[in-house]
Amino acid sequence: MLDQFWYPLFLFPAIPLMMTTFGNRYASLSALIRKMHDEIVIQNIESPNRSRFLEELKILNQRMTLVRLMQTLSAISFIFNLLTIFFGYLKLFDISVICFGLAVIIFTTAIITFIIEIQLSVKALKKHLEDLKEI
């Protein structure tokens, strides 16, 4: 039964690493949103450019929601991974296996959400570069 302790150990370092990655994305997004907000308010950007900025901010807001979801799912997955180790320690192997399965499923969902957020990131960059088409 000692073999069951190995499985959560594989997942254990991956989750905090991804949480750090997601946290960095959150920090970058929040800085970008604040910068764009200041540009719109301080410079009083007018109609055509303003609508482009607002569309880009809408995409960034969607990305922020996804990043928050990724962080939450990763944290829940980490808790289930810890529960896997705890229940394995208590020799409650059936519960331990269920917790590990949930950790893997939830973490997989976080990674899928990450992929979706990356796609939105590309969409936001394309929106940002639209003004260069006019030059």
Image (cartoon, grey):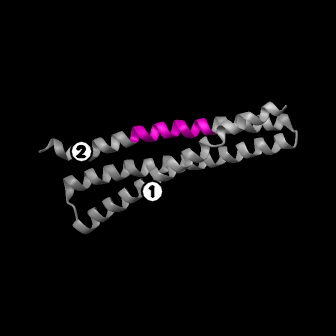
Q: Horizontal placement of 117 versus 110: left or right?
A: left
Q: Residue at x 36, y 56 (%)?
A: 32
Please, what is the three-letter code of the amino acid marked with disc 2? Leu
Q: Horizontal placement of 25 versus 1: left or right?
A: left
Residue 123, placed above or below residue 41: above
Identify the element where label 2 is drawn.
loop
In the rendered structure, find residue 27 and report the number of the disc placed on it.
1
Quadrant housing the C terminus: top left
Foreground label between 2 and 1: 1
**Mark 2 neighbour class, 10 Å CA radius: few under 14, some 14 to 19, many 20 or more:** few
Q: Main secondary structure of the magenta part?
A: helix
Of residue 45 and residue 9, the one placed in the foreground of this image is 9
The residue tagged 2 is 129
Nearer the N terminus, badge 2 or badge 1? 1
Q: Residue at x 19, y 47 (%)?
A: 131
Q: Which residues lie in the magenta part?
A: 107-120
Instruction: Give residue 26's position: percent from left, percent from top.
Output: 46, 53
Q: Horizontal placement of 56 versus 15: left or right?
A: left
Identify the element where label 1 is drawn.
helix
Q: Residue at x 51, y 48 (%)?
A: 22
Please, what is the three-letter code of the amino acid marked with disc 1? Ala
Query: Does the magenta segment cover residue 6?
Result: no
Pointers 2 and 1 in contact (C-beta within 8 Å):
no
In the rendered structure, find residue 57 and report the number of the disc placed on it.
none
**Could you tell me how far apart the alpha carbons at marks 2 and 1 are, in whole angstroms?**
22 Å
